Image (cartoon, grey):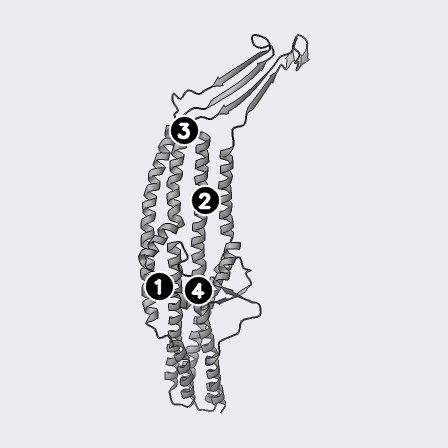
């Protein structure tokens, strides 16, 4: 009777939803994780500072050169034996004021280069968001479905512990053979080892999530995925050409490559302008050192572009344009291949998913309850019972893996198109 009662508990364990969450657990959905990510991620904050620095360069480019003032005074007059005399009789001093005037529109061209630098920093920021957001969603779904698989292990381990305890009691009474005990222990130890390895993986994945969202390290994350998330994803409603167009219009890395060319073109204009000398105007006053006394003069300083006409920087700017065009073609090729590969992979996963019976898990749960009853009534052997256990675990884990691949394909399409095609 004791064996039958213990085996009867197995039915309840399989029908149970699993272990309840701890009181200090943090329930987290993907939209909530994304909000925390955008608000708290240190990499995004650091990259935003890069954007702010680029905007500060625009302020610098808008500024005019400061005027310069110079002053020279007689230090010591040996005739009067006095220091720093400034009177008109025995003193002497000279003062000058100068201002650099930039020609060829250098200031405006500097502003254009700085504005292009801001766009480069912004697209780098957007591309970082795109990459990290995909890492977040992919890690989130991987963690969630691994947690669902862990529940299966917990259920089977708890059930086998009860079964082992009951059979050990029956072994003492001579009702079961030692080989049956060994088989149960072998399966139990195997499940415990797999469960421990899975929990290590889950801990690593949770660490990545906590780093991405800046959640405290000691938090126990219980991830939540609503059934609507799986149901609302319908790949067949999106045509490949539409996904490709979306990627061309929204991918930040492609826009970054285009902006890189614009930056190089603006820099070429600036370097050509730098080949034209700037003019320095000056106003000078000299008390007694020039003719006539109390001399006031105006001066112009203009470098002669005889040797240095900024040839090297101009050539570098031209090379940067050619390199940028090659980089753009490469980026366009990468984009097209990534979109096609992601779409093809998503189609294969979707076809495989739709090939499974939607009631598979529910039917399997009912079936294992019947198997436990039949084993309790000695209608099936221990070997058959354990084989079914292994099949149940393998099938459930396979389904969780397929669900993860399906949801990850959804997020990968969002990633390669640079937009939220699927929510």
Q: Name which residue lies at 31% across and 45% down.
A: 329
Where's the C terminus, which quadrant? bottom left
What mark, if any, has residue 235 been given in the picture?
1
* Residue at the (37%, 48%) spot, across then down: 254
Q: Earlier in the sequence, mark 1 or mark 3?
A: 1
Q: CA distance from mark 1 to mark 3?
A: 53 Å
Question: Which residue shows up at 45% across the image and 59% down it?
Answer: 136
Question: Residue 357: where, in percent of width, then height?
Answer: 35, 75
Could you say whether the residue bearing mark 4 is in a helix, strand or loop?
helix
Q: x%, y% of residue 294?
A: 60, 11
> Who comes first in sequence, dot 1 or dot 2?
2
The answer to which quarter of the image holds residue 234 is bottom left
**In front here: 371 or 363?**
363
Residue 4: x, y in percent?
Answer: 47, 89
Q: Percent from the top left, x then y, of residue 89?
A: 66, 8
87 in relation to 125, above or below: above
Q: For the residues marked 4 and 1, what is the alpha-carbon distance in whole angstroms?
A: 18 Å
Residue highlighted by disc 4: 141
Along the horizontal axis of the image, is 349 left or right of 189?
left
């Amino acid at each position: 009777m004791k064996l039958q009662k213990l085996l009867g508990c197995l039915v309840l364990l399989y029908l149970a939803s699993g272990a309840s969450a701890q009181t200090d657990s943090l329930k987290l959905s993907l939209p909530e994780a994304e909000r925390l990510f955008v608000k708290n991620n240190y990499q995004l904050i650091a990259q935003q500072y890069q954007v702010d620095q680029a905007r500060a360069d625009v302020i610098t480019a808008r500024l005019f050169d400061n005027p310069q003032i110079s002053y020279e005074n007689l230090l010591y007059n040996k005739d009067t034996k006095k220091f720093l005399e400034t009177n008109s009789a025995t003193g002497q001093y000279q003062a000058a004021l100068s201002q650099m005037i930039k020609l060829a529109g250098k200031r405006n061209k500097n502003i254009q280069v700085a504005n292009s630098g801001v766009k480069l920093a912004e697209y780098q920021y957007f591309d970082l968001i795109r990459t990290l957001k995909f890492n977040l969603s992919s890690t989130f779904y991987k963690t969630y479905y691994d947690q669902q698989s862990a529940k299966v292990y917990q259920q089977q381990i708890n059930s086998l512990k009860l079964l082992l305890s009951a059979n050990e009691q029956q072994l003492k009474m001579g009702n079961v053979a030692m080989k049956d005990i060994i088989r149960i222990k072998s399966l139990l130890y195997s499940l415990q080892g797999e469960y421990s390895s899975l929990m290590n993986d889950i801990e690593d994945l949770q660490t990545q999530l906590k780093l991405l969202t800046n959640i405290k390290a000691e938090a126990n994350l219980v991830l939540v995925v609503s059934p609507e998330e799986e149901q609302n994803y319908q790949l067949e409603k999106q045509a490949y050409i539409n996904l490709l167009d979306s990627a061309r219009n929204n991918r930040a890395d492609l826009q970054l490559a285009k902006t890189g060319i614009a930056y190089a073109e603006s820099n070429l204009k600036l370097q050509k302008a730098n080949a034209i000398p700037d003019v320095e105007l000056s106003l000078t006053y000299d008390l007694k050192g020039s003719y006539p006394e109390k001399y006031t003069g105006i001066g112009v300083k203009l470098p002669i572009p005889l040797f240095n006409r900024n040839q090297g920087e101009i050539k570098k700017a031209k090379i940067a344009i050619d390199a940028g065009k090659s980089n753009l073609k490469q980026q366009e090729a990468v984009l097209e291949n990534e979109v096609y590969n992601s779409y093809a992979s998503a189609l294969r996963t979707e076809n495989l998913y739709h090939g499974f019976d939607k009631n598979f898990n529910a039917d399997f749960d009912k079936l294992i309850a019947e198997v436990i009853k039949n084993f309790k009534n000695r209608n099936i052997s221990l070997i058959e019972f354990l084989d079914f256990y292994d099949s149940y675990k393998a099938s459930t884990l396979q389904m969780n893996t397929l669900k993860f691949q399906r949801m990850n394909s959804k997020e990968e399409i969002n990633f390669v198109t640079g937009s939220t095609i699927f929510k």
